[in-house]
Amino acid sequence: MLALMDLDKRKLAVRNFYEQFCAANPHLTLFETVVGGKCPEVCPISQQVASLKLLAKFVSSGFDCVEIQRAKQNIPQTVSDTFERHFWYSQWTLSELFLVKIQIAGQDAFFLFVAGLCDDGWENNTSFIEIFTDRGEFVGATDLFFDRNVQWREKQFNSSI
C-alpha cells in the first residue's frame, strides 16, 4: 500500500509541475522550451533520451530524411515500449518524437512529446505528451498544444478510441 501512495504523490508532483509551468508561461509550451530551446530562462533542466525528427520537410513529395536518436541509457521497459510504439505509428502519422528526462521533486520523470504533423483520423496522430515516473509508471497524458486548461488522461494514447 505504501508504494501506491508513493506513486500517487509522485503523479501529483509531476502533474502539479506541468500545470504550474503552463500557468506561469501562458504563451509558451514545455515542448517549446525543452525541445525547441525557446526561452531558455524558463526551461527546466532536462536531458534528451531519444528522438525521431523529420528533416527537410516537404521536399518534393515527402521528407528528405529522418534523424533518429535511440536511447543510450537504461530506461524502464514501459517507457521504451511506448517510444517504440509511437516510433512505429510515426511512419503513417508523420510525427516527431522527443523523449526527455526532467527531474521533478528530486525524482526523474520521462516526458514523451509526440508532435503530429497531419490529421488522418487516428487518435495517435495528434500532438500530446505521455509522462512516466523513473520506474516507468504511467503518470498521465495530455494535449501538447492546448488552451491552457490541462485535461489529464488516465490512459495512454494509442490507435484505439
Image (cartoon, grey):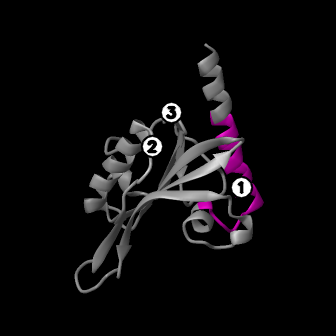
Q: Is residue 108 above or below residue 38?
A: above
Amino acid type, mark 1: Phe
Q: Which residues are magenta?
A: 11-30
**Residue 11: percent from left, percent from top:** 63, 35
Q: Secondary structure at mark 1?
A: helix
**Residue 32: percent from left, percent from top:** 59, 67
Residue at 57% over, 42% down:
152
Q: Which mark is residue 75?
A: 2
* Residue that mark 1 sits on: 21
Kindly report the distance in space between the C-alpha atoms of the residues bearing marks 1 and 2.
25 Å
Q: Is residue 99 above or below residue 96?
A: above
**Residue 61: percent from left, percent from top:** 22, 81
The reply to whether residue 33 is visible in this rendering is: yes
Mark nearer the N terminus (3 vs 1): 1
Does the magenta-highlighted stretch encompass residue 38?
A: no
Kindly report the distance in space between the C-alpha atoms of the residues bearing marks 3 and 1.
22 Å
Q: Secondary structure at mark 2?
A: loop
Mark nearer the N terminus (1 vs 2): 1
